[in-house]
Amino acid sequence: MAERKRIAAIITEYKELSHADVIVTKYLKGFPTDEGFFEPRVDVASMYIDQFPDDDIGRQIAHEHVVPIYPSIVKALCLGANELAVDGVLLIGEHGDYAWNEKEQHLFPRKYFMEQICGVMATSGRSAPIFNDKHLSYNWHDAKWMYDRAKTLGAPFMAGSSQPLAWRDPWLEHEPETPIDEAVAIGFSGLDIYGFHTLEVLQCMVERRVGGETGVKAVTCVQGDNVWQAADDGLYSRDLAEAACACIDDKPPGGMEENCATPALFVVEYCDGLKGAVLMLRGYVNQLAYAARVNGETQACGIFSQGHGGPSGLPYAHFSYLSLNVEEMFLTGIPQYPVERTLLVSGVLEAALTSRYQGEKRIETPWLNVEYQSYEDVKWRPLGPRPSGACLAPWPPNPELGK
C-alpha cells in the first residue's frame, strides 16, 4: 500500500468556525457531502499556528489528533528536521489580530507565509502542492509574486474560496464558450471579506465565456445613492440584479433601496468588452447570487452555503467540496481549477478598494491582463441545488474516523 501523503497546515488563527476550523478540521475528522461522509485520504502531519487567542481550539484539536504544533513554518514543513518533509501545504491565512490599512483591507500575512513555504521548497530541491485560502494578497505585487514563485518552483497551486463550489439553485453552469454579454453577482457584508467571495462567484461563471478569460481593463467602486444612479447610467443592468436577488430566500419586505443604507458596486470592465458588476447589498440579502445575459436571455441562480446564520454545529459542508478538490491536488499533483481565477480576482478587489479610497475614481488596470481558460469541470461538486440531509449531521458517528 502506498504511503499516505503528509500535509502541513500553516494557520494564522484556529478558533471555532474560523477558516482553519472549517477546512483543517475536515482533514482530521472527514468531509460531509451530499453523498455522505468521506474519510481523509491524506494525513495532517504538522501545524504552525501564528496566534493563540483566548478562544483558540487549535491546540486541543491538535492534541486530540496527535498532530504536533511547531514553533515556525520552517519546522512545520520539515517536521522538525532541516528539509521539506511533507507532500502538501494548507496555507490558511484568514482570521487573527492583524492590522487594517486605510483602504479597509485586512493585512493577513499570506505572502510572508508563502515566502517561508517556498523558501523551504527551494532549498530542499523539491516542491509540493500548495493551497492558499481566499485571495492571494491584499495587494497586486504580492499576489503576483506568490503566483510567479509557485510557477518558478513547479509547485502545483490552488487558491480561492468555497463559494464557486457551493450549491446553486436553480443549478446554473455555463457551457464553455457561452456568449455572455453582461453579468452581475450579488453579495453582502464587508467589501474586503465578502467582496472577494462575490467577485469569485462572478469570475467562476464568466471565465467560461466565448474565448475564455481575457483580463480586466478597468475597475470602479461606487457607493450609496450613486449605486442606484449607476444603473440609470448603464454601468450595470438593474433587471439582472433583480433576477439574481429573486433567487435568494428570506429577503425583508421592500426592495434594494428600502433595505440598503450603504450599498456598494464594483464595475468590472473586461478587456473583451464584457460588462461585469458586483452589487453588495448589506441589509437586503444574506446569500450570494448571480445573473447573466446570454443571447438576450436572462439566466440566474442563488449561491447557497450551509450554516450561514445557522447553528455552529453544522459542518459547513460547502468547505468539504473545496477541501476535497484541494485533497485531489495533494494526491495527484494536478490543480482542479485554475489559480489564475483567484489571481485576477485578487487584483480586481484591490483595484475596487483603491477606487473607493480615491473618491470612486475609475482605475485603469493594464496589469490585470490575466488570460486563461476555465477547466471543463472539477471532480467534487454538490449533487443538488441545496444542502442535503447527508450534510446535516455535524460529524459521522464512526469513532475511528479522524483518529
Image (cartoon, rainbow, N blue to C red):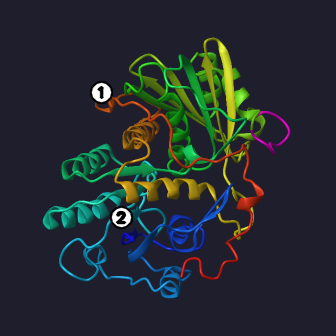
Q: How many marks?
A: 2
Name the main secondary structure of what is drawn in magenta: loop
For the residue marked with disc 2, what is the amino acid? Answer: Val
For the residue marked with disc 1, what is the amino acid? Answer: Pro
Up-down: is 6 above or below 328? below
Q: Is residue 17 left or right of residue 149?
A: right
Q: Which residue is mark 1?
A: 366
Q: Position of residue 84 (x, y in %)?
A: 23, 71
Q: Residue furthest top?
A: 296
Q: Nearer the viewer, mark 1 or mark 2?
A: 2
192 and 119: which is toward the camera: 119
Q: Residue at x 49, y 65 (%)?
A: 95
**Residue 249 falls within the magenta-colored stretch:** yes
Q: Which residue is mark 2?
A: 89
The span shown in magenta is 248-255
Q: Residue at x 63, y 45 (%)?
A: 188
Q: Secondary structure at mark 1?
A: helix
Up-down: is 185 above or below 99? above
The image quadrant where one finds the C terminus is bottom right
Q: Secondary structure at mark 2?
A: strand
Q: Residue furthest right?
A: 253
Q: Is residue 129 left or right of residue 199?
A: left
363 and 357: which is toward the camera: 363
Up-down: is 252 above or below 255? below
**Residue 370 falls within the magenta-colored stretch:** no
Identify the image quadrant of residue 394.
bottom right
Q: Earlier in the sequence, mark 1 or mark 2?
A: 2
